């Protein structure tokens, strides 16, 4: 299953999944009434949105879900607690969920960065002993610079080492070997 490798290619589709999970959890929360609460379940869509779609989507769900629950408390249910208590509890939930979203996003960024670095350093490179070209996955031989530049953020700057300068340009430099 290539779920983790294709996640960046289809972010909007996965976002719909997280939104659907959030809506389902809010419906369960609504039908269970004001006295039974599932705020721990709010972590699921917040974590998934933060991991796969980024911090802002996770934070959006971290704010929206408790606010919907607050709306249930204020307008739809008859609850024994005051508006101040309901708002205060909502702020606590938003703070906890937003912190969680930020932590998940940070971990996701670090994990994706480490995965990219591991992919760069992983495996053996078949290199020609003479011309130093590298054979890629399609059995095509590419110049080393082109191969490495396509797989990493490095750029090449060419120069001539002292040994090669003497070997190839010794007559120009006045010292033949």
Image (cartoon, rainbow, N blue to C red):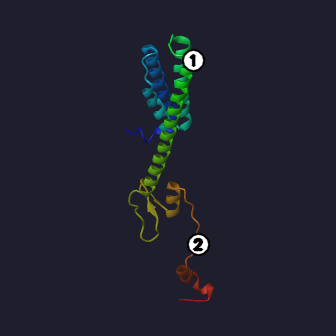
The x and y percentages for residue 25 are 45, 22
The x and y percentages for residue 103 are 49, 41
Q: Quadrant of residue 166?
A: bottom right
Q: Is residue 169 left or right of residue 130?
A: right
Q: Is residue 61 visible?
A: no
Q: Is residue 51 visible?
A: yes
Give the SS element for disc 2: loop
The x and y percentages for residue 36 are 42, 18
Which residue does the numbered mark 1 point to in the structure image?
83
**Closer to the observer: label 2 or label 1?**
1
Q: Foreground residue, 169 or 68?
A: 68
- Identity of the residue furthest to the left in this view: 1
Figure quadrant of the N terminus: top left
Disc number placed over residue 159 in the picture, else none:
2
In three-dimensional space, the C-alpha distance between marks 2 and 1, rounded to whole angstroms, equals 72 Å
Give the SS element for disc 1: helix
How packed is label 2: few (under 14 Cα within 10 Å), some, or many (20 or more)?
few
Residues tagged 2 and 1 counted as in contact (Cβ below 8 A): no
How packed is label 1: few (under 14 Cα within 10 Å), some, or many (20 or more)?
few
Q: Foreground residue, 30 or 22?
A: 30
Seen at 45% across and 21% down, the residue is: 24
Does 72 appear above or below 60?
A: above
Seen at 48% across and 21% down, the residue is: 23
């Amino acid at each position: 299953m290539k779920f983790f490798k294709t996640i960046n290619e289809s972010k909007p589709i996965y976002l719909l999944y997280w939104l659907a999970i959030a809506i389902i959890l809010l419906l369960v929360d609504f039908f269970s009434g004001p006295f039974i609460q599932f705020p721990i379940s709010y972590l699921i869509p917040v974590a998934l949105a933060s991991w796969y779609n980024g911090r802002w989507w996770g934070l959006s769900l971290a704010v929206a879900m408790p606010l919907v629950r607050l709306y249930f408390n204020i307008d739809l249910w008859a609850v024994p607690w005051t508006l101040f208590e309901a708002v205060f509890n909502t702020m606590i939930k938003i703070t906890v969920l937003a912190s969680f979203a930020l932590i998940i996003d940070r971990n996701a960024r670090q994990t994706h960065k480490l995965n990219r670095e591991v992919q760069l350093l992983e495996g053996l490179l078949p290199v020609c002993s003479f011309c130093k070209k590298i054979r890629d996955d399609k059995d095509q031989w590419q110049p080393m610079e082109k191969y490495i530049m396509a797989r990493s953020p490095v750029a090449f700057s060419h120069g001539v080492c002292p040994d090669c300068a003497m070997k190839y340009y010794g007559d120009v430099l006045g010292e033949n070997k």
